[in-house]
Amino acid sequence: MLFSTYGTVLDVVAMKTQKMRGQAHVVFKDVQASTQAMRALQGFEFFGKQMKIVYAKGPSDVIARLRGTYNVPATTLASQTTGASTELQKSIFSGPPGSAALPSKPSGEVNGEPQAGQGVKRPREEESDEEEAPMDEDSDVPMEASSDED
């Protein structure tokens, strides 16, 4: 909201890493809008500190993608394709998903005899509605004396 009053904001990059803490990159659509925002907000107090605004050292990836000139950095491609995979990486990525974390299934036999399936519910005992269960709801209220005794 603060920067959008000066022009169209295409992207905001704010990272929480220790190196980038307290910094953000704001990408405007055109240079005039960014210049206007930089001049107006230089020294603006934001959360108790004055903002220091400078132009970026290089063009943003968002601008390059819009122009159609974006190229994936060579360092990223080189590390992904030529990186030697270790035995640990092979064991993790070569198997089917989730196979390493699953425990082995226990057989249904104990000492050669098949066991009943685990987790089987017991049948519900039938209760008749005719039986009157004592109710404790009115136990703290004294009972009235019956008038049958004459």
Image (spheres, rainbow, N blue to C red):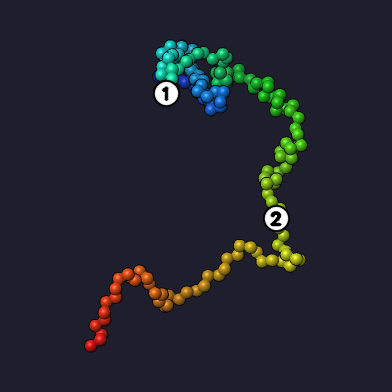
Q: Which residue is mark 2?
A: 105
Depth check: 32 or 131 in front? 131
Disc 2 secondary structure class: loop
Quarter of the figure with the N terminus: top left
Q: Is residue 45 left or right of residue 80?
A: left
Amino acid beneath label 2: Lys
In this view, 83 is above or below 108: above
User: Which is nearer the N-term, disc 1 or disc 2?
Assistant: 1
Q: Is residue 39 left or right of residue 92?
A: left
- Across and down, in percent, residue 143 comes to 29, 75
Q: Residues within 10 Å of mark 2 (few under 14, many from 20)?
A: few
Would residue 114 be seen by someone viewing this image from the given angle? yes
- Across and down, in percent, residue 105 comes to 70, 55
Would residue 36 be seen by someone viewing this image from the given angle? no
- Across and down, in percent, residue 71 comes to 63, 20
Depth check: 72 or 99 in front? 99
Mark 1 or mark 2: which is in front?
Answer: 1
In this view, 142 is above or below 118: below
Q: Residues within 10 Å of mark 1 (few under 14, many from 20)?
A: few
User: Marks 1/2: CA distance?
Assistant: 57 Å
Quarter of the figure with the C terminus: bottom left
At x 61%, y 62%, the residue is 119
The circle drawn on residue 145 is none
At x 46%, y 11%, the residue is 35
The circle drawn on residue 47 is 1
Disc 1 secondary structure class: loop
